[in-house]
Amino acid sequence: MSDACGILIGGSPSTGSSVLVNVLNRHPELAAGPETYLFIHPDLYREWDRYGHYLLKRDRFRGLKSIGWFRKNGADLLLPEYGWDPAGLAALLNRSASFPEFVEGYFSTAMTRKGATQWIEKSPSNSLAFPDFLKFFPEGKVIHTTRNPYDAVASLIARGHSPWYAAGAFVLNAAMALRSAEHPRYRLLRYEDWLLDPQKELRQVLNFLELDWREGLLTPSSSELGEEVRMEGWLSNEKGALSRDSIGRFARLPAGDRHQMIQALQAFELTPAYAKKWDL
């Protein structure tokens, strides 16, 4: 086991993780990029020799299949922001004796480009493997983003998901993340607290990460301000100025829509067998 470090952000989708990672990426000591889904597979941590090669070649029937509500086969590692091509990635995989060693090599390119000292990766489903990450990355830290569940479900439905899918995504990811709630390298960040007093909350996050405050972290660049809202259903640009528009989103919906969402959240339940299997 290496003294690997790094920072994961995860939790239920539509809880502000995209906004958070873009703000943190303005810090000169942190390097972030798009979602890779690299950290959502417990098998990579536990059985690297058996499952690591599936990062290069996805298998329809075997390989790396996500364990959560969001279905994902493998990981997305050839994104241009991380600077790898297939040949280079294969060489890195072949010389990596463990998952932490592979991760250290994988993020080194992006960190060198920026001059950063730590990498940070955001995928909501990172919460599926928070306990494994904290075990195998002894210097690593996790940030769990959460939100009023009704507002989160309303946001997911606006993005095109069904009420049942939205409720399941919130409940399962939150339950998975909360397994690590007592760990000293776990930090909970509530969406409403973050947007109502961003400087206070961001300072606390930076203290948790052992990083200094830097001016401009809460100020989008001109290029960020010029970007369009990335995902259908979002009320603001994830890289733009922080906005409170999404707080109370559920309460502004018609009564029929609210009733449907309440029913979905009340109906979704993790079975005892599933809870036992994943120590929920």
Image (spheres, helix red, strand yellow):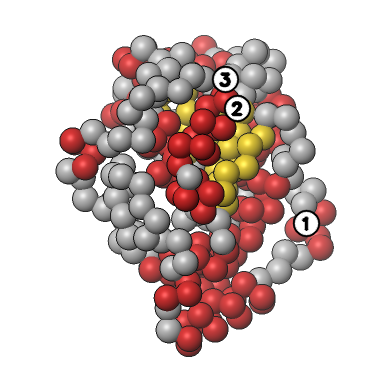
Instruction: Check if mark 2's residue and mark 3's residue have beta carbons within 8 Å.
Output: yes
Q: Secondary structure at mark 1?
A: helix
| Mark 2 → mark 3, Cα distance in angstroms | 5 Å
User: How packed is label 3: few (under 14 Cα within 10 Å), some, or many (20 or more)?
Assistant: few
Which residue is rendered at x = 33% and y = 33% of the image? 79
Q: Which of disc 2 and disc 1 is earlier in sequence?
A: 2
Circle 3 or circle 1, nearest the eye: 3
Taking depth in this image into account, of 30 and 221 the one nearest to the observer is 221
Q: Quadrant of residue 101?
A: top right
- Residue 254 place in picture, x, y as percent: 43, 84
Taking depth in this image into account, of 189 and 180 the one nearest to the observer is 189
- Residue 125 place in picture, x, y as percent: 55, 46
Instruction: Check if mark 1's residue and mark 2's residue have beta carbons within 8 Å.
Output: no
Q: What amino acid is at disc 2?
A: Phe
Which residue is rendered at x = 30% and y = 45% of the image? 241
Give the number of the disc on residue 275. 1
Query: In the image, 5: left or right of 278?
Result: left
Query: In the image, 31: left or right of 142?
Result: left
Report which residue position mark 2 lands on. Answer: 208
Report which residue position mark 3 lands on. Answer: 210
Which residue is rendered at x = 30% and y = 35% of the image? 219
